[in-house]
Amino acid sequence: MPDQLPKTQDARREWLISALLAERDEYAQIEIPAEADEQRLLLRALFNVRPPMRTSDEFLHVQDAYLQDRAQEKGITRLGDLTPLQPHLYVWRGDITTLAVDGIVNAANSQMLGCFAPNHGCIDNAIHTFAGVQLRLACDEQMHAQGHEERTGTAKITPGFNLPANWVLHTVGPIVRYRVTPRDQVSLASCYQSCLDLAQESGLRSIAFCCISTGEFHYPNDQAAQVAVDVVQAYLQSTDDPMEVVFNVFKPVDYDIYHNLLG
């Protein structure tokens, strides 16, 4: 790589913003803000709206260095740092993009391309942001090969790229309209089972589940957690070589719900 590529986080961030702004003519009037926090927001927004397409090796070199150092700045949590509540079962409250396990689960939409809303607070947005632009491209290639949108309750796997996790398992959960239906329950259970099956087939030894279908998809937190625990516990009871399973939560209410369910 050329020696003139930036070596510090501040320089990398400004370099990346400039490169992304240069990709589209309509960005010509956007100025890079002076404050670091504002630059981070702008960079994330540019990542979020960028369509799936290839880029230069120089861009990937700078981006990867920036995102990997950013993960270190935020602090990485490893499975060995956690204490199980039951054999092979953990509950951890934190940012899933800083969790170093074999695989993390992304609550995706049926297009499987990540969240395009700038700086949106959903987990799909965060995972795609901190994995890097390679993740959207990898998902796009899978979807083109598949030829149709991802069905609810199924799962796909991609590399984690710049995340501490090695792999990302993408699953589309049910959207609750007015109340939870039996079909919603079956679909949500299928999300967890599909991820477990795919993780096992792929040789993963640890997996972290987010709270699939809660939040934007309106599945009640307590009912969603019950489905998750039921499926995972049934899996652990049915296999002689279980993987380690982390229930990753972000909200205090979910932390309390999972602790109550798991004792």
Image: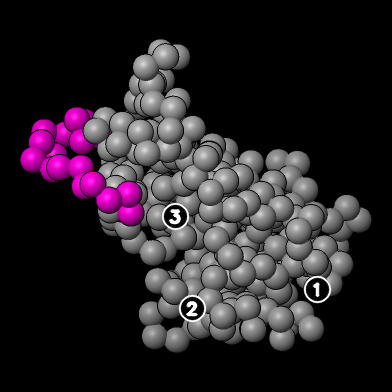
Q: At x 75% / y 55%, what residue is drawn?
A: 79
Q: At x 66% / y 58%, what residue is drawn?
A: 208
- Depth order, front residue of 221/82: 82
SS majority, magenta: loop
Q: Is residue 68 above or below residue 110?
A: above
Which residue does the numbered mark 1 point to in the structure image?
85
Say which of marks 3 and 2 sits in front.
Answer: 3
Quarter of the image for the C terminus: give it. bottom right
Q: At x 26% / y 30%, what residue is drawn?
A: 19
Q: Magenta stretch containing residue 154, yes or no?
A: no
Left or right: 235, with 94 as reference point: right
Q: Is residue 17 above or below residue 252?
A: above
Q: CA distance from mark 1 to mark 3?
A: 27 Å
Residues in magenta? 20-37
Say what secondary structure mark 1 lies in: loop
Which residue does the numbered mark 2 point to in the structure image?
219
Which residue does the numbered mark 3 point to in the structure image?
126
Left or right: 190, with 38 as reference point: right
| Dot 2 amino acid type | Tyr
Pointer 2: residues within 10 angstroms few (<14), some, or many (20+)?
A: many
Q: At x 33% / y 54%, what residue is drawn?
A: 37
Q: Quadrant of residue 188?
A: bottom right
Q: CA distance from mark 3 to mark 2?
A: 20 Å
| Dot 1 amino acid type | Leu
Q: Which mark is residue 259?
A: none
Say what secondary structure mark 2 lies in: loop
